[in-house]
Image: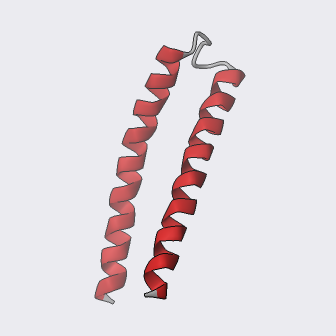
Amino acid sequence: MKTQTIGYITAAFSLVAGLAWNEAIKSSIDSIFILSKDTIWAKFIYASILTLILVLVTIYLNYLFQKENKK
């Protein structure tokens, strides 16, 4: 029960941190690209970059956990 509670608290903190990073990344993309932040292309670019980063991080974490479990 204690482990689950710690997991839920960690997930909540991760969500808050993720939302903060979301705003930071959106602002960075808005300043880099000339496109207006409300255009459909800017939103697709943002979603594509974020998806790529998250997939790469997930693959890396999966690799680390599998490596740790083999020991």
Locate residue 23, reporting x and y percent.
43, 33
Q: Residue at x 37, y 82 (%)?
A: 4
Residue 36: name its quadrant. top right
Q: Between residue 4 and residue 61, name the one nearer to us.
A: 61
How many numbered marks have been drawn onto this rendered protein structure? 0
Compared with 26, 1 (above or below) is: below
Q: Residue at x 32, y 79 (%)?
A: 5
Q: Between residue 22 and residue 28, name the one nearer to us.
A: 28
Residue 48: name its quadrant. top right
Quarter of the picture containing the C terminus is: bottom left
Name the colouring of the figure.
Answer: secondary structure
Quarter of the picture containing the N terminus is: bottom left
Extreme-front residue of the structure = 71
Locate residue 64, reporting x and y percent.
47, 70
Is residue 6 toward the left or the right of residue 63 in the image? left
Q: Residue at x 64, y 23 (%)?
A: 42
Locate residue 58, reporting x and y percent.
54, 60
Is residue 18 toward the left or the right of residue 30 in the image? left
Is residue 30 toward the left or the right of residue 14 in the image? right
Compared with 71, 53 (above or below) is: above
Is residue 3 toward the left or the right of residue 70 in the image? left
Locate residue 30, reporting x and y percent.
51, 19
